[in-house]
Amino acid sequence: MIMIKRIGLILLLSFALYGSHATWTPGMTKQDLPDAFAVASSDASYVRIEFNRRRIDFSKPVRICVDASQATGWALCSGGDAATPLQFREADGLFEAFLPQDDSCYGVRLANRGLRKVTLDYTRSIAKPPIDMAPIMSEPKGEPHEVSVVCQQKDKLLILDTGRLTATFDISAGLRLKQLFCADMNRQILEYPKQTELFRLKLDNETILNSSTAAIYSIKTNERGFIAQLSFPIGIVATLECFRSGDEIAFSLKLTSDHEIAVKTAFPQIDGLLLNEDGNDYYCFPWGGGVIGDAPAYLRSIYGENDAWWQMMDLFSPANGGGFFLRVQDATGLAKGLSMRKGRTPPQENIIRPPRVAARNNLSLYFYQFRLQDGNGSGIAVDYQRSTLAPGKTFVLPVTLIGSHSGNWKAPMNTYANWAKSVWTFRPYPGKLSQKFNYLAGFGCEGELYTGHVWDREGFEAKNDICEINGWWSVSPLAPWNTPWEQFEQLGAAAQQDMKSSFGYGIDPFSRKPFYVFCRGDYDSYNPQWGGLPRFRRQLKEVRDKGKISLLYMDPVIVCGNSRYGKTEAPSYAVINPDWKDPHQCPKNPTVPENVVCNYYSYCMCLNTSGYLEKIAEDVKRVIEETGADGIRLDEYGHRGYVCLSKNHKHIFGEHGQHVWLQALEHSLKLIREVIPQDTLLVSEFPQADFAASRLDASLSYDICRRQSPLRPLQINLFRFYFPECRLFELNVGGPQNAKDIMLFNGNGVFNSGGRYSKEYTKIVHENAKCFVGEIEPLVTTLRKFVYANRFSSIDGNKILYSLYNGTGQTISGPVLEVPAGYSYRQLLPAASKTQPEKPMDGNAHIVLNSNQIGIILMERLSTR
């Protein structure tokens, strides 16, 4: 009786602490299961229960209690049966354990040792519909029509018709967009037109000027559209041209003023959109590799801060079979904010916005600092940094186009990518790195580069394709900032910790004296004390002889004060910004020039200036000529950059205080490309944006580990599919456990992430490398909702490789893909077991996948097998 009372007390406490519980007992059918359990099965050895994770809040403790004679079990975590032992403890006749407190656990497997009952105590998750990233599209409700008159005026209305998109403008008071009719959806989508402004101007005193309140000075129509001159009482004149461009409507805006005045511009703001009567609109938004979904959200990213990698936003309606897009036709790399809103007041976790980073951006310069304002329906907008208008000066904003389309977001994404490749010259594709997957770096970071076995055995396993070499330039006999080693403590605690880890420091094998590796800035001499350039060239030959790509590390964004350049020129070209705080808190950072920006015990250099950029290009040219390396990996290239306020050097782009890093970065890459052989490889640390990536053969990417959001249930990387000329190699620094599965799902390479791809994964990608450079398409249709697939086809069409990802939240078994006539299929991943049943003869590819597990199916033309 006492035992029963204790168990009853435990249950009462569990209700108080957790709020919800679910129980399984032997003999339960699927219909008997509580909604927290998706699947349950048992045999004489084990009980397996999979959870409905959308019902459970895994950010809070989740306890499992087992009523059995003995308890042994494992938590099933994402990426297959990566079982984690549960730590059970006995408590008054029951055994309890806690599940991993994140969203990776999808079930448990328990040893069936007299097991009588399993109870899960948990906090119920607020019900949220799952995000379907690849909804089935209905056939378009309408179709484009022939147009005889593009632009016509009817009383106080202007009607501009492309045959696919019809825009109606009200000119009765100011200029306002009144209607948008999308022929593909057969729907007028501008449900709340008062939320739309064709452009908005914000003055320094926070006064806002809208196109709808401007005085119309003149309107002239022509065969392709109209030109409106609008004026404001403070002396600003806006010339807005709206015209047909193929199936799209283009907007062009020019601003002038009769006196000097600063404005922040939003152009355009198209808000109050409703593509579907019930508001179930989907979106595709450029944040890293992309956000696709239908959940209420505030989305904002900056093009120019390694945030938005392209300049297109899309809304689409699966029910109506089409969508509406906006794309910016800017070939100059101008920094801009891209904003999208769906619904009102979304939950906090559905808000994505750029961070404020002192001295590295200035969000206060934009019209929208954080997000588009609240409103009904959905909205999209583009805004630009504060710019100065003055007499005799015309501020011309990039042309923006809007359009209607059938199907999902893929058509406008193709349109945008094709435009980008028509204005920028991307690298040859397929290129030298297109079929490379494992990228190993770090040689020379921890000590002397040449003694003993220079390249360790692991570094030259067959699975490694690329070797990046550091520390090849002449190292420094002094610690950073020319500090004697006996005074090393003056560099601060962070430097002392680095010294203990040996990262960047070493001991000369001959003199036994310490040296500092990261003496970056001169990139020459090649350490003559250890054999110099001749020996280094022999080492690079070893790399080539083993069939590897050799890349040399350089970081032009920083210059070490120990280098010759650091002692002479670097202070003049360094970034100046009083808001900067050194993350390493080095007490020896120089104070002259005043407010100089220092990081990694070095000067941070401004790329927005002539003189230094030419020096970078000449350094790269000389190093390639002298060493014969395959290419250069430019560290820090592509990151958010800095806002330089220096008056010690002249700036090339932008006004004082503006963030123009993308334009400066692209200009640096352009100068480098002009002086090196065309087949020289350039690799950056970040893609930054398509504008700069057009000059890169590859880039590292932190998309999986640093852009995690509930809005991205699977981190699809659209950039990889639409701009494959710039090969991506993903890092996983504190990211999800199944990061390599996501990398393989996207067909990307791996950079230094826990040993590169496994032998199993490497075998798959190497044997089918030609598939990854043929016809590729993300998120193709599958036969199972929430099972996602990417298609990689060889150029000759003989092989089609599908990467699959099970996002259902539970184990699936059955058909997932249709097999084309004339093809057979094989399952490459998970590795087929000997007990795997025969393939069903229904014309479909079948597979068994655990929750969040990746699968690979290869289809081959029968005549070529």
Image (spheres, rainbow, N blue to C red):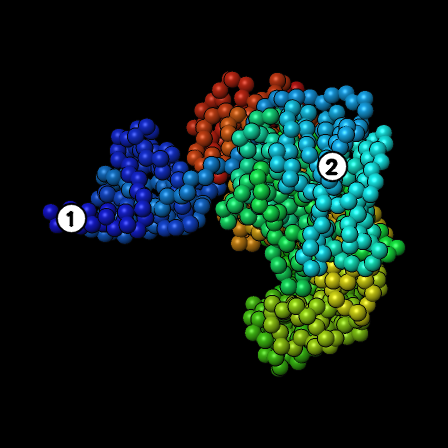
How far apart are the two marked residues, 2 and 1, measured between alpha carbons?
79 Å
Q: Secondary structure at mark 1?
A: helix
Question: Does residue 425 appear left or right of residue 78 in this picture?
Answer: right
Q: Is residue 331 above or below residue 193?
A: below
Q: Name the image quarter holding residue 118.
A: top left
Q: Given the image, on which type of amino acid does mark 1 rest?
A: Lys
- Residue linked to disc 1: 5
Location of the C terminus (image quadrant): top right
Question: Does residue 851 appear left or right of residue 387 in this picture?
Answer: left
Residue closest to the far left: 1
Image point (32%, 48%), residue name: 18
Q: Name the image quarter holding residue 76.
A: top left
Question: Does residue 60 appear left or right of residue 832 in this picture?
Answer: left
- Residue linked to disc 2: 172
Q: Is residue 394 visible?
A: yes
Residue 621 on image: x %, y %: 83, 57
Say which of marks 2 and 1 sits in front: 2
Q: Given the image, on which type of amino acid does mark 2 rest?
A: Ser
